[in-house]
Image (cartoon, rainbow, N blue to C red):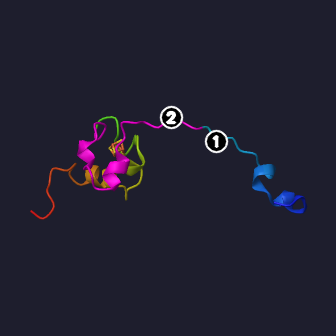
Amino acid sequence: MKEAYARFDIERVMPLHVETVAKNTACRCGEVLRGIVTPHECPLFGKACIPTHAVGPCMVSVEGVCAAWFKYGQGRFVYGK
Ligand code: SF4
């Protein structure tokens, strides 16, 4: 951004430090989202990872696969039966 517009640069106006956290490698969201595993195949599902204490992004939103799986039966039902 040119100096003339520096007053509109939010990084200058409101410097923000965002702390990074280490990824929990036990989270299998990447595989869940690709359909490789179901949520209950994640070792954290329903234990360390629940909707009120999500470990991975799939459990955060009500639209998340793991959150929906947790809310609607924790995978006890089988689709199509
Ligand atoms: S969101 Fe939670 S249950 Fe889903 S894969 Fe990640 S850690 Fe496992």
**CB of mark 2 within 8 Å of CB of mark 1?**
no
* Quadrant of the snapshot with the N terminus: bottom right
- Residue placed furthest toward the right: 4
Residue 11 within the magenta-colored segment of the rendering? no
Q: On the image, numbered disc 1 is attached to which residue?
A: 18
Taking 81 as reference, is 48 above or below it? Answer: above
Q: Is residue 22 left or right of residue 14?
A: left
In the rendering, which numbered label is found on residue 3?
A: none
Q: On the image, numbered disc 2 is attached to which residue?
A: 22
The location of residue 53, given as percent across then percent down, is 40, 40
Whether disc 2's CB lies below 8 Å from ligand 1 is answered no
Q: Is residue 68 left or right of residue 73?
A: right
Q: Residue at x 29, y 35 (%)?
A: 47
Marks 2 and 1, how far apart at CA? 13 Å
In magenta, the rendered stretch is 20-46
Taking 18 as reference, is 30 above or below it? Answer: below
Nearest the eye: 45 or 23: 23
Q: Quadrant of residue 6?
A: bottom right
The dominant secondary structure in magenta is loop
Q: Is residue 17 left or right of residue 81?
A: right
* Quadrant of the snapshot with the C terminus: bottom left
Disc 1 residue type (three-letter): Val
Nearest the eye: 76 or 23: 23
Q: Secondary structure at mark 2?
A: loop
Taking 79 as reference, is 12 above or below it? Answer: above
Q: Residue at x 64, y 41 (%)?
A: 18
The location of residue 55, given as percent across then percent down, is 40, 40
Of labels 2 and 1, the one closer to you:
2
The location of residue 75, given as percent across then percent down, is 20, 50
Disc 2 residue type (three-letter): Ala
Q: Residue at x 80, y 51 (%)?
A: 13
Quadrant field for ligand 1: top left
